[in-house]
Image (spheres, rainbow, N blue to C red):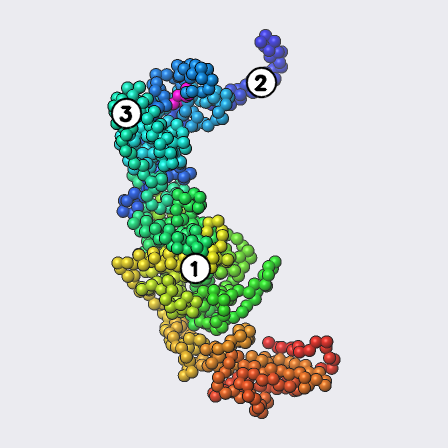
Amino acid sequence: MKLILRSLLKLKPTSKVILAVLLICLVVRLLPYFAPIRAADIAQNQLAMQFSDRNGLPLGTLLTRDQEHTSVVPLNQVSPQFIHAILAAEDGSFYHHGALDMKAIIRASKEAIHAKRIVSGASTITMQLARMLDPVPRSFSGKLSEIWLAWRLAAGMNKDEILTAYINRLPMGGNIYGVEAAAQTYFSIPASELNLAQASLLAAIPNNPTYFNPYEHWERLKQRQKYVLNRMVQEKYISGANATRTHTEKVVFQSRQGGIIAAPHFLFWLANQFDKPQTEQNSPIRTTINRPLQQFVEAQVQQVISSLAANNVHDAAALVIDKHTGEVLAYVGSPDYFNEAKLGRNDGVQALRQPGSTLKPFVYELALEKGLIRPNSILADVPAHYAIPGAKLYSPTDYTERFLGPVRVRIALANSLNVPAIKVLEKVGVETFLERLHQLGFEHLNQTPEHYGLGLTLGSGEVSLWELARAYLTIARQGEAIPLVSTFSNSPIPTDAMNRVSTNSSLFNPTIWQLITNILSDSYARATAFGVDSVLNLPFPVAVKTGTSSNFRDTWTVGFTTDYTVATWIGNFNGEPMRQVSGVTGAAPLWNRIMLHLHEHQEPADFPSPEGLVQLPVCAISGLRPTPDCTSVVQEYFYPEDKSNYEREHQFNLPPEYDEWLAKQQQSNFTSASLRILSPHHGDLFLVYPGEQTQQKLEFKLAGNKSAPVEWWLNGEKLDTNSANSLFWNLRPGKWTLEARSGEMNDKVSFQVELANIKPTRRGFSISNN
């Protein structure tokens, strides 16, 4: 020591200053490890919250954002029976020793030496609290750290404060912590009402919460309870007779749902939305959930999943919204939250999945709004091919795996036809459509327009059921966007309650939204793909849209009445495809059950007709004013300014994009009332080689099969033929006009044949001006 002092004295002044600064820094750094710990220093901030439904019925309690059940109560609000039980079981002389119990240490040491193994522990409640606050390895150094922390606790807190902190942190099995949480979870009573039997059982659990699990190891827990009761007798808290009687008393634990009565996914989601940890809750948080409805939907989810198990379907989610207020009435995230083996904690309402065709109504609405299509427009549902950089040629098909040719906007949307939807998106532009989806609240569609491409309208992005329900609520409200509401104003408002949708913001022309609603509620319009009597058709007015993602991984059904919006999803959390389960066979039956239940006692009102539009009769196929040979007449909406065109147009001439489709038609309602030459095309140029005029032939061909007689005329001369639909003609140089006549119908094309100078190695090519 003298040598150290002499060395320090010999240091230069500058070195002494540096050394002093280092020593001060060391002391400052170590000071927290010496300072007493006060009760305020270890106050529990992330406390449990209690929730009720809209009518005050309890939904669940003790939920924190880390999914642990914790509830802090003062010592005077805990049953004396439990205080006595836990003291007797864990530290009988707690109030008579300091941080350490030297008598217990000596006793435990003697027992260990005699038995050559550890027989009993010597940890005090203060030491156990230290271990809860700072878990350390079960080693010699870890034990020293635990003892040091216990001394600091004892230096800064009185006994009641230490005991309060201890009983509010006790591990009570699973994710339950503290006596209040345990009492509420296991018995649905506050800790102040625990009787001796309940208290002694709860005091038995913390010693080894897994080993003494009341649901899995009841006999073990009863043996530990017997030990607790015997210790209470030894500490003179109860008599031996009382202990015997209590041990035989029947105690019923609630189901293992941890005190959650309904809507577990909703409660955990809601708990995560609050700005700050809830330090105290004087009353339950009143949510918008309707508990009877919630429990009905939960039961229906389980039943529908059971019925689809053979199709490799295991998971589902559902959301019910009040159309008038935006309030969430039911929220089911999975068939069973508490089944961890089946990923039950996954929340299908908030999970991101491909939405299939459920985004199509929004691209049609945007195209109508911008005047790119009209309510009476005819769209082409024909084979189409798109070159996508870095991918194979994209050739979309429809849900029915066939094409309908010319279709009205109503038919294209109602039947969820893919090709017309892509053609409409081409007109709108992917970037413009993506901007609209952002306005509607699809915040997770955060990639570039190039990333999604034209597949965006078919579900190439990922959205949540929550976002879909919110967007369809906007349709139901005729373009008025409002946030989804989860709690009432007398409860704390979650930070995400506004859902990034401006309150009372209106997305443009309500008439167009009314038209979209009218189309989605037209059961006859969707009959081609879904039939007239599908689960989508209900005995009251309802608008609905289904969606199926690629490889049958996700199925969706979202729809609304004038009172409610209901969104359902069915699929598998692990990403496995279902076996041939589409939106109409997967999510739709669940949606159907919920809708029927909601309107069991009162049918919803009719949807309003699109304001300012006029209804006119049209031919179902061509969309034009009906003619005598029209086989099906329906009513369609028109803008008033389109009425003059309606009066003037009588004949619908299909452009060349229909040729491939027409060539494949065997029986066509459209071609039965029309006449069209498929081959040759108007303006074609053919080359014929010297000496092969009799070998080279050109097919004259009509679309479909004409049952009525057809006359072929070439340059004004009638051709002799026994074939109504096609014939072969020997190529001859010249300019030709080909005409087909059938009754009052006719079609005419012009083409040219020239004599070639050089014979190619391959025959039969043509040059077209089309």
- The kind of residue on which mark 1 rests is Gly
Q: What's the distance in space between the residues labelled 3 and 2, CA to CA?
A: 65 Å
Crowd tier of the residue under label 2, counting other residues whose Cα lies within 10 Å: few below 14, some 14–19, many 20 or above = some
Using the numbered discs, state the Cα–Cα distance from disc 1 to disc 2 in whole angstroms.
75 Å
Residue under numbered circle 1: 583
Which label was assigned to residue 474? none
How packed mark 3 is, by other alpha carbons closer than 10 Å (few <14, some 14-19, many 20 or more), is many
Q: Position of residue 438 (x, y in %)?
A: 46, 55
Q: Which residue is mark 2?
A: 19
Q: In the rendered structure, which segment of residues is drawn in magenta?
A: 121-126
Which residue occupies the extreme right position in the image? 758
The answer to whether marks 3 and 2 mark residues whose Cβ atoms lie closer than 8 Å is no
Which numbered circle lies on residue 243?
3
Q: Residue 420: x and y, percent? A: 49, 67
The question of residue 125 being in magenta is answered with yes
Question: Counting residues from the N terminus, which is met first, the one under dot 1 or under dot 3?
Answer: 3
The local secondary structure at tag 1 comes to loop
Residues at marks 1 and 3, CA–CA distance in whole angstroms: 61 Å
User: Which quadrant, please, contains the C terminus?
Assistant: bottom right
In-image side of 540 versus 658 (left or right): left
Q: Is 671 placed left or right of 78 in the picture?
A: right
Left or right: where 363 falls relative to 328: right
- 217 and 646: which is toward the camera: 217
Q: What residue sits 40% from the left and 53% below the top?
A: 305
Residue 684 shows in this picture: yes
Q: In the rendered structure, which amino acid carries the disc numbered 2?
A: Leu
